[in-house]
Image: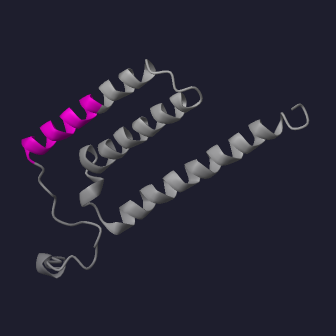
């Protein structure tokens, strides 16, 4: 067959393949500064006594940093909805597993309080 029959200018055959988004160096510098600032906030928060909130604050900051990395460094912000759904399903599954683990851990102390 000739090559022109396989050309798909409307990108109908593979809609997940689209033009690549070019991110400029200034965006990466802003992200670098953001990650550096969040790391500094994490270190500063470790020296503040917040009781049971210390690990919660640390995990919250880590989640924000992970979100920045996934969205910009992994270019997920510019990907198709199918890939975003895949990432969302993975995060949702992870949260279910964490909830199940914590519910088992917390239920072991029932009756001992």
Furthest residue to the right? 111
**Residue 8 in the image, given as x and y percentages of width and height:** 18, 77
The residue at the point 30 percent across, 50 percent down is 71
In the rendered image of this protein, does residue 96 appear above or below residue 9? above
| Nearer the observer, 100 or 39 | 39
In the rendered image of this protein, does residue 14 appear above or below residue 93? below
Say left or right for 17 vs 109.
left
The residue at the point 30 percent across, 25 percent down is 40
Furthest residue to the top? 47
Say left or right for 63 vs 96.
left
Residue range of the region highlighted in magenta in the rendering: 24-37
Q: Quadrant of the N terminus?
A: bottom left
In the rendered image of this protein, does residue 93 appear above or below residue 43? below
| Nearer the observer, 113 or 102 | 113
The residue at the point 30 percent across, 66 percent down is 80
**Residue 13 in the image, given as x and y percentages of width and height:** 28, 77
Say left or right for 3 vs 63.
left
Locate residue 39: give its quadrant. Answer: top left
**Residue 34 in the image, given as x and y percentages of width and height:** 23, 36
Locate residue 112: give its quadrant. Answer: top right
| Nearer the observer, 61 or 17 | 61
Q: Quadrant of the C terminus?
A: top right
Q: Main secondary structure of the magenta part?
A: helix
The residue at the point 50 percent across, 53 percent down is 90
**Residue 49 in the image, given as x and y percentages of width and height:** 50, 21
């Amino acid at each position: 067959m000739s090559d022109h029959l396989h050309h798909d200018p409307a990108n109908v055959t593979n809609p997940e393949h689209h033009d690549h988004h070019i991110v400029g160096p200034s965006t990466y510098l802003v992200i670098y500064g953001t990650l550096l600032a969040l790391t500094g906030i994490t270190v500063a928060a470790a020296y503040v006594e917040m009781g049971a909130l210390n690990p919660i604050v640390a995990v919250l900051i880590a989640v924000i940093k992970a979100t920045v990395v996934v969205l910009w460094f992994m270019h997920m912000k510019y990907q198709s909805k199918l890939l975003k759904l895949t990432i969302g399903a993975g995060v949702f599954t992870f949260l279910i597993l964490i909830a199940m683990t914590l519910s088992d851990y917390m239920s072991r102390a029932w009756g001992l309080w």
